[in-house]
């Protein structure tokens, strides 16, 4: 049985389906947006039913709600339904727009509204158990068509023998972006916390798109694994555990020597792209003017050009924009003089 902790991405996908469009979608439209992008029917059915129920309970917490739900085959406990439990957890930090699209469409909300109109105080409302006209489909094996980046991230670390606890923590967040019909687009934020870091959290974000949620999330996860995972492991969490997947070089800085632990260069749009090493060298030279405490610092470069014209210029130091680095990129030649090209490099500066 799938655990509620592995449903983080599925719940965000469900919320996005309710939020899509200028007008509130019908149940059929929500269903199509889910299943049409690869959400398995057993999961889509639960998202359609349980998200409005969970959001109503968070929006109107003073009402007494039953834990039981009645189906033709018998009564079951909502709190033991992993999709409902995950939906209720997500509802704790829902925004106004999400409440308006999701909670207000619930039958439970309509019943409460009628009770209030009749003069009953909200604290005195006691609702009967909601009733399903048909039994829910059995919970399927696996992730229901929506992989959990959190589960994947933790799985990567387990494979490298890295325990998670009070010192080392990881977190992920899935953000759904608007996309043309037939395509889904996501951004996945991968975050790690460790006492050795210069800031409490180091965050790296990757985008992915495709016809299904599995493909879109998979692309984002694969780019994270290629470009950022191994420097995080080898430079921070377990030195030496991924030495064959990173490059290490000594970096002299006025505040002391560091080791630069680099992941693979990610190239987009063009097949053959020169190394970004010359640009990285210029960035490291400029970095000597910045104070660096004796902690682990993250450095990330993302630059895109089209026919030599700069389109994207993002240099992050400790997950925050670094204006000095972006000035270096702006004054540097394009990676390729013609066509569209983007380059991404991530590394950690580890006190030597």
Image: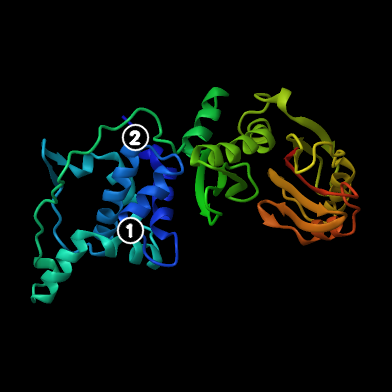
Q: Nearer the viewer, residue 154 or 8?
A: 8
Q: Is residue 121 above or below residue 148?
A: below
Q: Nearer the viewer, residue 18 or 276?
A: 18
Q: Could you tell me which secondary element the residue under label 2 belongs to?
A: loop
Dot 2 or dot 1: first in sequence order is 2
Tell me which residue sits at (81%, 40%) in the image.
Answer: 257
What is the x, y in percent for residue 199? 62, 51
Tell me which residue sits at (50%, 43%) in the image.
Answer: 171
- Residue 166 visible, this orientation: no
Q: Nearer the viewer, residue 126 or 212?
A: 212
Where's the N terminus, which quadrant?
Answer: top left
What is the x, y in percent for residue 71? 13, 41
Q: Is residue 31 above or below residue 99?
A: above
- Mark 2 lies on residue: 3
- Mark 1 lies on residue: 26
Q: Could you tell me which secondary element the residue under label 1 belongs to?
A: loop
User: What colour scheme has been applied to the protein in the rendered image?
Assistant: rainbow
Label 2 environment density (alpha carbons within 10 Å; few <14, some 14–19, many ≥20): few
Marks 2 and 1, how far apart at CA: 28 Å
Q: Quadrant of residue 242?
A: top right
Image disc number at residue 270: none
Looking at the rendered image, the disc whose residue lies closer to the viewer, 2 or 1, is 1
Count the numbered circles shown.
Answer: 2
What is the x, y in percent for residue 153? 53, 35
Is 309 on the left or on the right of 264, as rendered? right
- Residue 12 visible, this orientation: yes
Q: Nearer the viewer, residue 173 or 287?
A: 173
Tell me which residue sits at (23%, 64%) in the image.
Answer: 60
């Amino acid at each position: 049985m799938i655990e509620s902790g592995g449903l983080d991405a599925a719940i965000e996908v469900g919320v996005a389906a309710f939020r899509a469009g200028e007008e509130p979608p019908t149940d059929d439209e929500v269903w199509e947006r889910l299943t049409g992008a690869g959400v398995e029917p057993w999961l889509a059915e639960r998202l359609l039913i349980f998200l409005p129920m969970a959001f109503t309970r968070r929006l109107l917490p003073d009402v007494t709600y039953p834990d039981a739900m009645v189906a033709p085959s018998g009564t079951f406990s909502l709190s033991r339904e992993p999709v409902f439990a995950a939906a209720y957890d997500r509802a704790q930090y829902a925004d106004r727009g999400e409440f308006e699209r999701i909670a207000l469409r619930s039958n439970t909300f309509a019943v409460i509204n009628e009770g209030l109109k009749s003069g009953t105080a909200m604290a005195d409302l006691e609702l009967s158990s909601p009733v399903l006209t048909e039994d829910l489909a059995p919970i399927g094996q696996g992730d229901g068509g929506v992989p959990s980046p959190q589960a994947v991230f933790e799985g990567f670390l387990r494979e490298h023998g890295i325990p998670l606890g009070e010192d080392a923590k990881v977190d992920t967040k899935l953000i759904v972006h608007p996309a043309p019909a037939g395509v889904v687009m996501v951004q996945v934020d991968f975050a790690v916390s460790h006492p050795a870091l210069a800031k409490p959290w180091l965050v790296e974000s990757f985008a992915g798109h495709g016809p299904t949620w599995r493909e879109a999330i998979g692309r984002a996860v694969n780019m994270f694994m290629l470009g950022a995972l191994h420097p995080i492991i080898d430079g921070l969490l377990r030195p030496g555990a991924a030495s064959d997947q990173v490059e290490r070089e000594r970096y002299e800085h006025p505040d002391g020597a560091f080791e630069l632990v680099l992941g693979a260069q990610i190239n987009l749009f063009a097949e053959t792209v020169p190394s970004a090493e010359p640009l990285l060298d210029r960035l490291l030279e400029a970095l000597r003017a910045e104070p660096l405490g004796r902690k682990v610092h993250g450095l990330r470069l993302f630059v895109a050009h089209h026919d030599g014209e700069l389109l994207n210029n993002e240099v992050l130091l400790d997950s925050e924009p670094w204006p000095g680095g972006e000035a270096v990129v702006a004054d540097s030649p394009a990676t390729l003089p013609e066509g569209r090209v983007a380059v991404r490099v991530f590394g950690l500066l580890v006190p030597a």
